[in-house]
Structure formats: C-alpha cells, structure tokens
Image (tube, grey):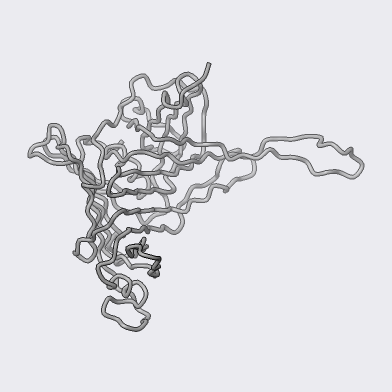
Amino acid sequence: MGYSSQAGKVLFRTQTVPDTAPADFATAHRAMKLRGGSLGANRDLLITDPEIGGGRDTVDAYLGAVAWSGDYEFYARLEAMATLLKACLGSGATVTTTGVSTHTITPLDSGTLPFLTVEENISSGLEVYQYIDAVVNTFHLEAEANGYLMGTAGLIARKQTAGVTPTASPLWDDSALIVGTNITITYNAVSLPAKSFSLDINNNFEDDDFRLGSFYLGDLTAKSREVNGSFSLRHANSALWRQAVYGTQAATTPGGLTAKNQLVITCTTYEDIVGGTPLTKGSITITIPKVAMEPFAFEPSGDDILENDVPWRALRPAAATPLGTFVIKAANPQIA
C-alpha cells in the first residue's frame, strides 16, 4: 500500500499569541492547494568523537535541538496569498464593499513579524502535523508570458506536534488563477514589454538560535529585509542598460549616482469576483516607489535576438514611506 502526495493538504492561520495555536483555527483558517513542498526537521544526531581508552566503534548518540523549515510551491491564488504575504511583510488592512475585499499589505519595520499556525497533512492517513510559531522567511513570485503566476513561500517553524486530529472541513481557496497574458509591468510610468518577471522577498531569519535546556529555537526575529527581482525583455534601445551601468538613461559615461523609479506589477484574473458589485476582477497590484536597476551586460551570440534578464533592487523611499504596497482584491473578507 502506498500513499499519494496529492491526498495531502496544508492549512494556515495567523496566530495572535506566541506559542499558542488559535482557538478558532478550525473555522478561520485558509487551506491552500500546493504544487509541492513541506516542512522538514533540521536536526542532528549527536555522535561521540573517538576517546582514548575506548574502542574503535561509536559508543553512543543522542538527538540535538530541532527546527523545521521548507518551501511550499503553489499556483498563486489570491485569498491564500494574502495570508502568506501579511505574515511575510507584517501588516495588513482590509476594506470590504459588496462582495469585494481589498487587502492592502505593507512591510513592517519591526523585526517581529506575525506567527502562523500550520496544519500539514502528509497524504491521507500517513501523518498530520501541527506547527506553531511559524514565520514566512522568503516569498517568491514569478510568471512567464505563456504561463501561470506561481509562488513559493519559505517557512521556518519553532515547534511541531505529530499525530494531531486533522481539520474535518478545510476552507479551500478555490479562487481564480492568473496567467501571463493578464500581467503588466510599468517602470517610471512606461509600460515594459517583459517576457517574464520574478520578485523575491527575504526576511533573513536565523534558524539556529538554540538555547541550553530546550529543544526549540529561542527566537525568530527578522534581520535586514531584501526585496529584489528581475524581468526579461528584448531591447528596443539601450536606455535601461545605460541606466543600470552608467546610472542614468541619458549618460554616455559611467557616473556614481543611480536613477530610482517606481515599478508597478499588476496581475489580474480573467474572472470577475463572484458576488462583487460593481463587477471587479481579482487582482494583485505590487507598487514599489523606488527601484534601481542592477548592472547587466549585452551578450550577442550568432543571430540571436538581444534580450536580457534585467535585475533590480527595491530601496526605501523615505523613513515614513513603506518600501512598497501589495494590494489584493478578492472575495474573502478575512486575511486568515
């Protein structure tokens, strides 16, 4: 008898109290369909070194401290993505009209980000885990012109319990998918004919802060946040290359300053939000006010058309202005 991976499921719910699973988990979570992934134990078997006076064989072994981490890969559905993005960035506010909820998620300056409780069912009947005090360490989005918007969330969790009773009726996110033909990118208010894009957020949590007298991580505080990405495009001119390498699009020799402009990525469903008045498409709009291009090189080859992956880095506009905003329009009025 084997166990199918596809029979598993993963449920998320934001915690309000550290070290404590939410009492309303069964009725207020969000179940997310996955392409793959799970959290695995990071734990060492502590082996003794050879001892003078001892034999040639290892004499004993104990288990050390443990943390759990891993990546969840998914097609980007908007309702579940709101929960993961809020956990990754820290702050979320929701405005709801008739059938349409607008979730505005912004980066929090504090290194203390929201914890998640996660229920992970490995197949059907093989094992059910509950994780508490889980953080979203990394978040990745990508899409190609002829493909789906896809994501990956990298989580780290402090505690795991095996053999829990699975939630009987998961609240699935069955919202519409997004494809590349409904994704647009503008830079400095100019539409870019991008063939693909990627975006990465890294909170740089440490996963080895173990303390004497405990099996578990003592702390999960985010360090320096990195937000960067790239887009692939064929070059109509050399303006972006000049900006990335020389500093500005008008420069003809290298300078030290860099131009920083607004980047907007808009991803929209074909379908209207069911029950929404007026009719509204599901969407995520990512606005980063200050983006600098990283240097890249043209790479001519034979008769190939010149195109590049153009990397970029998000910069903080000002102390009182967030690094960016992520606005999600969806049916669900709650960020789980």
| Left or right: residue 219 compared with residue 106 | right
Quick check: 190 above or below 21?
below
Residue shown at the point (82%, 35%) measured from the top left: 59
Along the viewing direction, whichever of 51 and 143 lies nearer the viewer: 143
| Left or right: residue 190 compared with residue 293 | left
Quick check: 289 above or below 222?
below
Q: Residue furthest top?
A: 1
Instruction: Please provide percent x and percent y for residue 20.
Output: 44, 33
Instruction: Please provide percent x and percent y for residue 163.
Output: 51, 22
Residue shown at the point (36%, 19%) measured from the top left: 168
Name the quadrant containing residue 45: top right
Along the viewing direction, whichever of 168 and 259 lies nearer the viewer: 259
| Residue 25 visible (yes or no) | yes
Instruction: Please provide percent x and percent y for residue 268.
Output: 20, 45
Name the quadrant containing residue 21: top left
Along the viewing direction, whichever of 162 and 271 lies nearer the viewer: 271
Along the viewing direction, whichever of 320 and 7 lies nearer the viewer: 7
| Residue 214 visible (yes or no) | no
Check the picture and name the quadrant holding the C terminus: top left
How many numbered dots are placed on residues in this image?
A: 0
Instruction: Please provide percent x and percent y for residue 136.
Output: 42, 45
Residue shown at the point (84%, 43%) measured from the top left: 50
Q: Residue furthest front?
A: 303
Q: Residue furthest right?
A: 53
| Left or right: residue 165 compared with residue 104 | right
Q: Residue furthest left?
A: 278
Name the quadrant containing residue 299: bottom left
Residue shown at the point (39%, 53%) measured from the top left: 201
